[in-house]
Image (tube, rainbow, N blue to C red):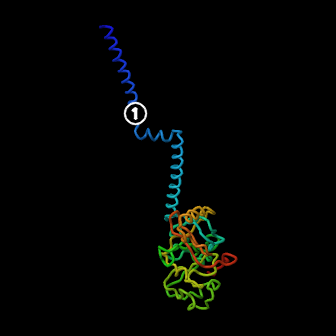
Amino acid sequence: MASGDGEDSWEWNDRETGSGGDGDEDGDGNEASDGGPLSRVRWFFDTDEEWVVFVREVLSSLGIVVVIGLVLFAVSGLWPPLVAIESESMTPHMQKGDLVFVMEEHRFAGGAAQDGTGVVTYRSGAAAGYTQFDEPGDVIVYQPDGDSQATPIIHRARFWVNESENWYEKANESYLGTAENCEELANCPAPHAGFVTKGDANDAYDQISTGLDPISGPVEPAWVVGTAELRIPWLGKIRLFFGQVSAAPGSAAPTGPAGNETVGAAGPAVNGTNTPTANGAAPIAAAP
């Protein structure tokens, strides 16, 4: 009886030990559970498992991109704040493949800005000694004829015209094509107030006809997306590459001598249609 009782007792104690083992496992689980999300987060950041390290690196890179994007947005007031240049109408001051930082035009506007617009024209900039991208005046991104569905343009604001103004005498005759008076110019007299614009490498204003329709009428302030502030060489090629890869057949960006630009990672393209001069940009002078 005693021996049997001892065996029974031993077996019972053995089972208790096994149960205690189960309790340890539960305890381990409970300990992780007690740690809750913080414990899991610590494990995620401390573990050396390859897949976790890879995920950490990806998330870290995305976080940096998001932070940079938010900072740029806070400074520029625009989203997306970066544009990629697609062709040559702003050479030599902007090259195809450049990435350009664009700012809402009223932020940090120059003292020579046209009243109420935040944009300094070539004419005003030359008088005030204000330059952007090595020439007087601001380079603006604008929607041609105010059409938000059209490809935006990045060109320099040359001078301001008032509604019904005969601006033929105000213009630089070098950029008027063959027109000899206002009546031979498109958009003259001006149908409304706005900026006359031109690509630095182009030989005609955007507002005149050189065998094709004008790129745009005088650019109203409401059509201006922002002003170009800084270019980063080459980085825009990445955006242009992915834009071409994702484009449907026949829908690639124009390849002519225009000022084409793609705005941000998901923005619209920007283009112009004037022909560049052989030697690039216009000389710095008071004439617009």
Mark 1, residue position:
29
Quarter of the picture holding the C terminus = bottom right
Left or right: where 282 falls relative to 41: right
The residue sitting at the right extreme is: 279
Task: Residue 45 in the image: state x and y as whole percent.
Answer: 50, 41
What's the residue at 64%, 80% (across, down)? 203
What's the residue at 58%, 74% (across, down)? 155
Task: Residue 120 in the image: state x and y as whole percent.
Answer: 56, 74
User: Above or below — where is 163 with respect to 43?
Assistant: below
- Residue 141, picture quadrant: bottom right
Left or right: where 24 falls relative to 156: left
**Residue 2 in view (yes/no):** yes
Q: Amino acid at mark 1?
A: Gly
Task: Residue 260 in the image: state x and y as whole percent.
Answer: 58, 72
User: Above or below — where is 158 with respect to 244?
Assistant: below
The residue sitting at the top extreme is: 2
- Residue 34, picture quadrant: top left
Viewer-side residue, 232 vs 2: 2
Task: Residue 276 in the image: state x and y as whole percent.
Answer: 65, 77
Tally of numbered tags: 1
- Residue 167, picture quadrant: bottom right
Quarter of the picture holding the N terminus = top left
**Residue 138 in view (yes/no):** no
Element class at badge 1: helix
How packed mark 1 is, by other alpha carbons closer than 10 Å (few <14, some 14-19, many 20 or more), is few
What's the residue at 61%, 89% (across, down)? 179
The residue sitting at the left extreme is: 1
